[in-house]
Image (cartoon, grey):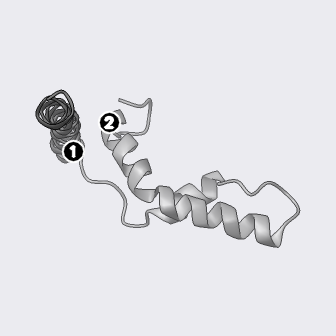
Amino acid sequence: MLPDVGIDPTFFFYLLRYLKPNFVAIARNKRATTAGLGHVTKRDLKNAHEEGVPPLPEQRAIAHILGTLDDKIELNRRMSETLEAMARALFKSWFVDL
């Protein structure tokens, strides 16, 4: 858990990932209106998610589900790569090596 905040770190990671397009837009707008680099401030973070965060048990449940989905997506990506490699090898053996 992050110190003195009451937020699960994995949930916070997914929250920031979800809010990333908002931060990019904020930074882009700041670059367009100021001479600086355009960065997201602490105030921007507070304003970006006005609804607040759910209680810790709910955060952990959400983070667990999202982590499981990420793991499944990665597994499917690797399986797809393996199947593509097998298909290439099969095609080569049928049509190139004959």
Q: In which quarter of the image is residue 96?
A: top left
Q: Find the distance from the CA under tag 1 to the CA under tag 2.
A: 9 Å
Q: In which quarter of the image is the C terminus?
A: top left
CB atoms of marks 1 and 2 within 8 Å: yes
Query: 89 or 39, which is in the foreground?
Result: 89
Disc 1 or disc 2, which is closer to the eye?
A: 1
- Residue nearer the viewer, 79 or 28: 79
Q: Position of residue 2 (x, y in %)?
A: 41, 31
Q: Name the residue under label 1.
A: 66
Q: Residues within 10 Å of mark 2 (few under 14, many from 20)?
A: some
What residue is disc 2 on?
10
Callout 2: SS? helix
* Name of the residue lying farthest toward the right: 35
Q: Is residue 12 or residue 93 the one in the foreground? A: 93
66 and 77: which one is in front? 77
Provide the secondary structure element on which disc 1 rests. Answer: helix
Lower position in the chain sequence, tag 1 or tag 2: 2
Q: Where does residue 53 sit, x and y in percent of width and height?
A: 33, 54
